[in-house]
């Protein structure tokens, strides 16, 4: 069995049909490029949904995985782990947060942050438990994070939802103010809404939310699962807006291809104590060795700064395409997280044409495609990608 079509048949027979896949069976990757089971080459502007910050199979990460796999992979959090502590030290020393807990995914990270907020409210805010989140936000698909997510179409098949969440318009500080009561323990928002189609807030939005949380004594949780680890042009998204969160969640790019999640907090609000939270695989040696190696490379080589430098180039090339095709209504982005909007619901057709042209893209909305390439992408690769995308758009 070697052809893509054969593997697609296997998937249909054996795998739960919960994902709308593109008909591409990827078997190999290197840097910004990936190849399918039929030998076709693609430029990857999806990067595992903003996971592969250093591209596919970066040597620093693959070496760390191989070395650790041949040494010791898993001992549980009953014991100390050197790679886990190396990663913890690196994240804390390069952020405004003081403590970290590792899980296995972004949803787990957000669950941990929400538990922390509940416990903090019980101890410090007379039992306050509600968390204000934004409409069109995305925080995960577990039952808790599903309730936090501000998108009814994800929720309607799984009611009744976990109580304790209040949803307000994104980029609207007054809406947060009006929703805040004596039951409010925290506000949880994304610095940029990625899954919603790369929704970028006003420059002063996060600063004003931070000021409001300080005034009311409630926690500010930033979901940086997609925006963290250099994606917006700084190591963490909050650094782009001149604020510091009380709690921050990470995943995706933190693993450079391996599954990991984390929530970090200021020391004053770490309300969790032994027995309150845990994970069998969270922070295991294999994943933290990979994450430490990737993060060290990211920081040592100032990849976030290079991402910021690449932002105007990518947006410029996307706007070149907007000038060519009248059905493109808007281009926007921050760092190497960008979106292209269409006048009508043609995203599915664009993805099909893009696959054929040899560029992998993501469509978070019927009228929007999203670009989240490796942070190591070159101008030449962007040029090649935009040429392929232009060829695809010409067929629509």
Image: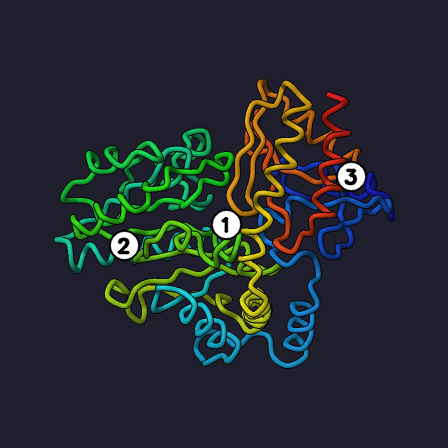
Q: Tell me the crowding category of disc 3: few under 14, some 14 to 19, or many 20 or more residues within 10 angstroms, Cα based.
A: many
Q: Position of residue 95 (x, y in %)?
A: 40, 64
Q: Secondary structure at mark 1?
A: loop
Of badges 2 and 3, nearer the viewer stands 3
Q: Is residue 34 above or below residue 116?
A: above
Is there a contact, CB below 8 Å, between mark 3 and mark 1?
no
Q: Nearer the viewer, residue 50 or 38?
A: 50
- Between discs 2 and 1, the one toward the N terminus: 2
- Number of labelled discs? 3
Please give the residue where the numbered disc 1 appears in the rendered image: 232
- Between discs 2 and 3, the one toward the N terminus: 2
Asked if residue 18 shows in the view, the reply is: no
Q: Position of residue 297 (x, y in %)?
A: 59, 68
Please give the residue where the numbered disc 3 appears in the rendered image: 358
Q: Secondary structure at mark 3?
A: loop
Residue 117 is labelled as 2
Q: Nearer the viewer, residue 6 or 309?
A: 309
Q: Which residue is pictured at 56% across the width and 27% down the height?
A: 341
Q: Position of residue 8 (x, y in %)?
A: 77, 40
How far, Cα to Cα, is label 2 from label 1?
Answer: 26 Å
């Amino acid at each position: 069995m070697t052809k893509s079509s054969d593997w697609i048949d296997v998937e249909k027979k054996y795998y739960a049909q919960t994902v709308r896949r593109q008909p591409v069976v990827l078997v190999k990757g290197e840097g910004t490029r990936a190849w399918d089971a039929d030998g076709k080459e693609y430029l990857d502007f999806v990067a595992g949904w903003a996971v592969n910050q250093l591209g596919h199979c970066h040597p620093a990460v693959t070496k760390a995985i191989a070395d650790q796999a041949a040494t010791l992979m898993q001992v549980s959090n009953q014991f100390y782990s050197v790679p886990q502590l190396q990663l913890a030290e690196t994240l804390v020393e390069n952020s405004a947060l003081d403590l970290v807990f590792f899980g296995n995914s972004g949803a787990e990270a957000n669950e941990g942050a929400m538990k922390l907020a509940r416990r903090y409210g019980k101890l410090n805010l007379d039992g306050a438990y509600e968390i204000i989140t934004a409409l069109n936000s995305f925080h995960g698909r577990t039952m808790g994070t599903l309730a936090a997510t501000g998108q009814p179409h994800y929720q309607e098949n799984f009611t009744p939802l976990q109580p304790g969440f209040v949803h307000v318009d994104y980029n609207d500080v007054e809406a947060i103010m009006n929703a805040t009561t004596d039951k409010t323990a925290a506000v949880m928002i994304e610095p940029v809404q990625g899954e919603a189609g790369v929704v970028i807030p006003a420059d002063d939005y996060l600063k004003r939310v931070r000021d409001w949380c300080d005034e009311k004594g409630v926690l500010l949780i930033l979901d940086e699962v997609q925006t963290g680890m250099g994606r917006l042009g700084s190591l963490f998204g909050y650094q782009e807006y001149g604020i510091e969160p009380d709690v921050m969640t990470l995943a995706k790019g933190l693993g450079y291809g391996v599954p990991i999640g984390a929530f970090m907090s200021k020391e004053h609000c770490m309300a969790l104590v032994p027995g309150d939270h845990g994970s069998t695989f969270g922070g295991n040696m294999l994943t933290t060795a990979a994450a430490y190696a990737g993060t060290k490379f990211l920081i040592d080589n100032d990849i976030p700064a290079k991402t910021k430098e690449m932002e105007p180039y990518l947006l410029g090339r996307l706007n070149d395409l907007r000038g060519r095709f009248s059905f493109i209504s808007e281009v926007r982005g921050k760092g190497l997280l960008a979106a292209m909007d269409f006048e009508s619901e043609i995203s599915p057709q664009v993805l099909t044409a893009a696959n054929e042209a040899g560029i992998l893209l993501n469509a978070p909305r019927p009228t929007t495609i999203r670009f989240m390439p490796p942070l190591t992408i070159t101008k030449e690769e962007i040029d090649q990608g935009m040429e392929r995308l232009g060829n695809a758009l010409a067929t629509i």
